[in-house]
Image: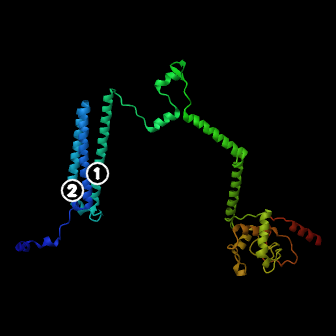
Amino acid sequence: MIMTVLFVPASVFAAGPPKPSELSNPLAIVLLTIIIGLLLVIAVLANVVIGAAKVNLQRYVEEKGRNAAKVATIIALCFLSTMAFAADAPAAVAAADDSTIAGLSSTSFYTLLSVIFLEIIILLVLLYNLKALLTKETIALAGTDQAPATSSSFIQWWEKFNSFKPIKEEANIDLGHNYDGIRELDNKLPGWWLYGFYACILFAGIYLYRYHVAHSAPLSKEELQISMDKAEIEKQEYLKKAGNSIDENTVKLLTDPADLAEGKKVFTTICAACHRPDGGGLIGPNLTDDYWLHGGSINEIFKTIKYGWPDKGMQSWKDNYSPKQIAQIASYIKSIHGTNPPNPKAPQGVLVTGGDTKVATADSTKAKVDTAAKK
């Protein structure tokens, strides 16, 4: 023994102990046990089907014999597949060592499951055939060539719900009117139609009370008005957002009194300190005459307010007010042009003639009249 060990090649020991077979894995043992158990059940059930065919349905012996041969072939294939799977298990382990399920390679695991699934299908087929044989046996014993009519529970409930009469009872409800083979029967209205009609009446009563008595829901005209009001609100919200897209290139002169009032409010708050509340000019230039340092059009005034002139002491207001508000301020400044406030600041800048249309206000008209009277 010692000499035998000494003369064994060292490579045998270098390879380490042999890897255990997958057949020793507990999961593989369980799956193989299930497969063998199902095969036994299939064999027993196949014998039962064959026996039932031979004893009770002699005219189908030959046909069922072929079916039995098919079943036997399937069983043999299952046995052969099981043996093949058992023989190939070590190779599967070697090919998929890095992907295992409970110590069993994924290939072997899913292969065994496939065999079990196939056996279950065979069992279902055999059970179906057995049921068909028993049904035919019942027909033969009853002496009829047709299977007893069996209907599902839903069909039975449907027929009972609608009070359908069978054909054999139609003579009892025949009214004696026959035209071209069409007979008039005293049948009741179908339940689905009758109860549907009752439901419509109930719905009409609820609708009448809710919409015309209690007024708890709007009528069609009221729904239209609600939709119109909602659309108007959405329109105003859109216009507010659209107003914020105004810039020095797209700004337009605003003449609406509400816009001018908003512009005056902001002007009195931030501009009056440099230009006086009446726009006559203090630190900043006079905004009511025809002289402008940076242009007197609505676009140029908007640009001046938006970006400012930091080198001359005027800050940018684009971060404090929205484009819509700046357009209102610019439009208000245009509206006070020509009002000739008392003690105005001396003209500064370049004389501008023409330009945008001037907005006439009551104050400016009055100022012009006073000036004309003084002259």
First along the sequence among labels 1 and 2: 2
Q: Secondary structure at mark 1?
A: helix
Q: Residue 86 got which mark?
A: 2
Residue at x 22% of width, y 52% of height? 82
Residue at x 50% of width, y 30% of height? 164
Asked if labels 2 and 1 touch by Cβ distance under 8 angstroms, the answer is: no
Image x and y of residue 120, in percent: 30, 48
Image x and y of residue 339, in percent: 85, 70
Residue 299 visible in the shown view: no
The crowd level at tag 1 (other Cα within 10 Å; few <14, some 14-19, many 20+) is many
Locate residue 240: give its quadrant: bottom right
- Quadrant in which the C terminus is drawn: bottom right
Q: Secondary structure at mark 2?
A: helix
Residue at x 30% of width, y 41% of height? 127
- 311 on left or right of 13: right
Residue at x 23% of width, y 44% of height? 43
- Alpha carbons under labels 1 and 2: distance apart: 14 Å
Q: Amino acid at mark 1?
A: Ile
Judge whether 175 appears above or below 220 on screen: above
Locate residue 149: give its quadrant: top left
